[in-house]
C-alpha cells in the first residue's frame, strides 16, 4: 500500500476504494461512459472531516483531485486519472424545517433525495428535470428546471453553504458571512471548495399538472413560433420547455407511432389545478423523475450549450433543420426558458451573469453504442454551429457543456469572470480544485 493510500485509510471513516478492490470499476464509473478514467483512489466521504482529510492528502501528495456529487457531469469532472476522488454520495441526508420552509441538504444528495424528503410536507426546492442529477453540481452551476420561471434558479434559493476550502478549513458562506465566497458559489461551479451542506429555501409545491404534450414534427415551425410568444408572457407558475422526442415504446404511445420524431412541450403547472388544461395531475417528484429511464447511467454523452436572448425566425429554421436528424430516443435539444423569476435577479447579484437571456438551449447527444460516437458527436456539433450565430449571445450554461468546451469558460461565466477569478485567487490560489469548468486564479494577490 502506498503512503498516500495509507494516509487516507488511517484518517477517513468512509471507504477508500482502489484498483485492488472488487468494486473499483463501479466506484470509478461516472454517468457518461465516454470517460474511462482510473483514479488512484475513490474516497466515499461520510462527513466534512473525511473531506478535510482527503484535501490534506491531495495537497501534500500533489495528486489531482476530483469532487463528485451525482456523477452527472458530461465532461466527467467527477473523476480523474491517477488522482483522488472525493465521492460525496454517502452524504445525502436531507432535513426539512416545515415551519421555516427550509431544507438542509447533504453535499452528495440527488434531486430525487430532496424531492423524497420535501414532498410529504408539500414543499420543494427548485432543481432540474431528471431525479438522478446531483444537487451539488447542478446548484453550483446555476440549476435550471421546472420551477425556474416561478421561483428562479436553484442558486436563487440557496440560503447558505458549508464549504471545505483548499486550505482545509470549513466555513459557512451566506449573505452574512464570507459573502464573496457565497456570491461565487452561486454559478461559479466547483471552483471554490467542497460544499458539504446546502441550505435551500423551499416553496409550496405538491401535486402539479404536467407532463409532455406531443406535436407532429411537421408542425415544428408553428409550435416553436407559438412557444416563443407564449412562454414570454405565460403565468410564472408554468414551467415549460420545448424539445424533440423520438417516441419510445411506452404504453401511452400508439404502437404505429413508436420511433417517430415529435416535438414536445414538457409542462409543469404549479398553480390551481382548475386553471390548467388538464394534462395529468401528479406528484412533483413523479414529474421530476419521468424521464430518468430515457437517460440511464452508462450511456455515451456529448452535449453543447448556448444562451439565446430571443428565438429568431432564423434560429427556428435551424432548429427544425437539425432537429429533424435527432438520432434516437435519448437524444434531443431542450430549449429551457430562463425568464420570469430568474430574470428578476441582477446579473451581478450572483455569479450566474446571463440574466438577460431568455433561453438556455442544450443539444443533448446520448447513445448506447461506442460505434456511434463519431456520428452523434457530429450531429451535436453541426446543430450547435447552425443555431449559435442566431443566439445574440456568447457563452452557454456551464452545466450543459462538454469537455472540449473548457476554453469557453470565460464567456460562459460572462461579465462576472474577472470577479470570479479574484475570488478564486482568494480561496484557492493554487487551483487545487481544477477538475471543473475552471476559473484561473487572478494574478498578483
Ligand atoms: C441526465 C442529465 C440531466 C440533467 N438535467 C439538468 C437540468 O434539468 N438542469 C440543470 O441545470 N442541469 C442538468 N444537468 C446538468 C447537471 O447540472 C450537471 O451535469 C451537473 O454538473 C451535475 O451535478 P452532479 O453533482 O450530478 O455531477 P458530478 O459529476 O458529481 O459533479 C459535477 C461538478 O460539480 C462539482 N460538484 C458536485 N458536487 C459538489 C459539491 N458538493 N461541492 C463542490 N463541488 C461539487 C464537481 O466537482 C464537478 O466539477 C443534467 C445532466 C444530466 C447528465
Image (tube, rainbow, N blue to C red):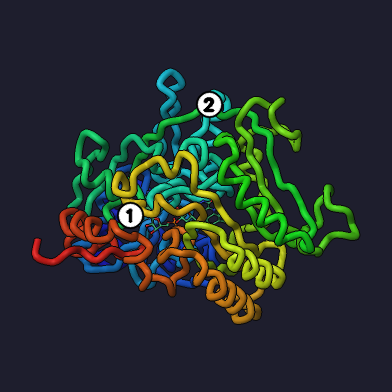
Q: Which residue is mark 2?
A: 204
Residue 139: give x, y in percent of width and height. 42, 47
Q: Quadrant of residue 197?
A: top left
| Residue at image point 17% right, 64% down | 442
In the rendered image of this protein, does residue 5 appear above or below residue 12?
A: below
Residue 436: give x, y in percent of width and height. 36, 63
| Residue at image point 43% right, 29% down | 95
Q: Is mark 2 within 8 Å of ligand 1?
A: no
- Nearest the viewer among 120 and 157 is 157
Q: Which residue is mark 1?
A: 188
| Residue at image point 40% right, 34% down | 200
- Nearest the viewer among 55 and 176 is 176
Report the side of 399 relative to 65 (left or right).
right
Residue 37: give x, y in percent of width and height. 44, 71
Ranked by sequence position, the earlier of labels 1 and 2 is: 1
Residue 371: give x, y in percent of width and height. 65, 80
Quadrant showing the C terminus? bottom left
Count of all numbered marks drawn on residues in the image? 2
Which SS class for mark 1?
A: loop
Report the side of 261 relative to 26 (left or right).
right
In the rendered image of this protein, does residue 281 appear above or below residue 227?
A: above
Which SS class for mark 2?
A: strand
Residue furthest to the right in view is 256
In the rendered image of this protein, does residue 11 appear above or below residue 345?
A: below
- Nearest the viewer among 1 and 370 is 370
Amino acid at each position: 500500500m502506498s503512503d498516500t493510500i495509507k494516509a487516507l485509510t488511517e484518517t477517513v471513516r468512509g471507504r477508500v476504494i482502489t484498483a485492488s478492490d472488487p468494486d473499483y470499476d463501479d466506484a470509478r464509473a461516472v454517468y457518461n461512459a465516454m470517460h474511462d478514467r482510473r483514479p488512484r483512489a475513490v474516497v466515499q466521504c461520510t462527513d466534512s472531516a473525511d473531506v478535510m482529510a482527503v484535501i490534506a492528502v491531495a495537497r501534500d501528495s500533489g495528486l489531482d483531485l476530483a469532487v463528485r456529487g451525482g456523477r452527472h457531469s458530461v465532461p466527467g469532472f467527477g473523476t480523474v486519472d491517477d488522482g483522488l476522488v472525493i465521492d460525496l454520495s454517502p452524504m445525502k441526508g436531507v432535513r426539512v424545517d416545515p415551519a421555516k420552509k427550509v431544507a438542509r441538504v447533504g453535499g452528495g444528495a440527488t434531486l430525487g433525495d430532496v424531492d423524497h424528503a420535501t414532498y410529504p410536507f408539500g414543499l420543494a426546492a427548485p432543481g432540474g428535470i431528471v431525479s438522478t442529477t446531483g444537487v451539488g453540481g447542478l446548484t453550483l452551476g446555476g440549476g435550471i428546471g421546472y420551477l425556474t420561471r416561478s421561483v428562479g434558479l436553484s442558486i436563487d434559493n440557496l440560503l447558505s453553504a458549508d464549504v471545505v476550502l483548499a486550505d482545509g478549513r470549513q466555513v459557512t458562506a451566506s449573505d452574512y458571512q464570507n459573502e464573496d465566497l457565497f456570491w461565487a458559489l452561486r454559478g461559479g461551479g466547483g471552483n471554490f471548495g467542497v460544499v458539504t451542506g446546502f441550505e435551500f429555501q423551499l416553496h409550496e409545491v405538491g401535486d402539479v399538472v404536467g407532463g409532455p404534450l406531443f406535436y407532429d414534427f411537421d408542425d415544428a415551425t408553428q409550435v416553436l413560433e407559438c412557444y416563443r410568444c407564449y412562454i414570454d408572457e405565460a403565468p410564472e407558475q408554468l414551467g415549460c420547455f420545448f424539445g424533440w422526442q423520438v417516441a419510445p415504446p411506452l404504453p401511452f404511445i400508439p404502437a404505429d407511432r413508436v420511433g417517430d420524431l415529435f416535438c414536445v412541450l414538457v409542462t409543469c403547472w404549479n398553480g390551481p389545478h382548475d386553471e390548467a388544461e388538464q394534462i395529468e395531475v401528479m406528484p412533483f417528484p413523479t414529474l421530476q423523475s419521468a424521464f430518468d429511464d430515457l437517460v440511464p447511467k452508462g450511456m455515451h454523452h456529448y452535449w453543447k450549450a448556448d444562451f439565446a436572448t430571443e428565438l429568431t425566425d432564423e434560429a427556428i429554421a435551424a432548429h427544425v433543420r437539425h432537429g429533424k436528424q435527432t438520432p434516437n430516443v435519448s437524444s434531443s435539444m431542450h430549449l429551457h426558458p430562463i425568464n420570469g423569476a430568474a430574470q428578476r435577479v441582477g446579473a451581478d447579484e450572483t455569479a450566474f451573469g446571463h440574466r438577460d437571456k431568455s433561453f438556455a438551449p442544450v443539444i443533448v447527444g446520448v447513445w448506447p453504442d461506442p460505434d456511434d460516437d463519431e456520428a452523434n458527436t457530429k450531429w451535436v456539433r453541426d446543430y450547435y454551429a447552425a443555431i449559435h450565430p442566431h443566439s445574440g449571445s456568447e457563452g452557454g450554461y456551464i452545466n450543459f457543456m462538454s469537455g472540449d468546451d473548457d476554453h469557453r469558460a470565460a464567456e460562459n461565466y460572462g461579465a462576472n469572470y474577472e470577479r470570479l477569478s479574484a475570488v478564486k485567487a482568494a480561496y484557492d490560489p493554487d487551483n487545487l480544485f481544477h477538475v471543473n469548468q475552471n476559473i484561473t486564479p487572478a494574478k498578483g494577490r
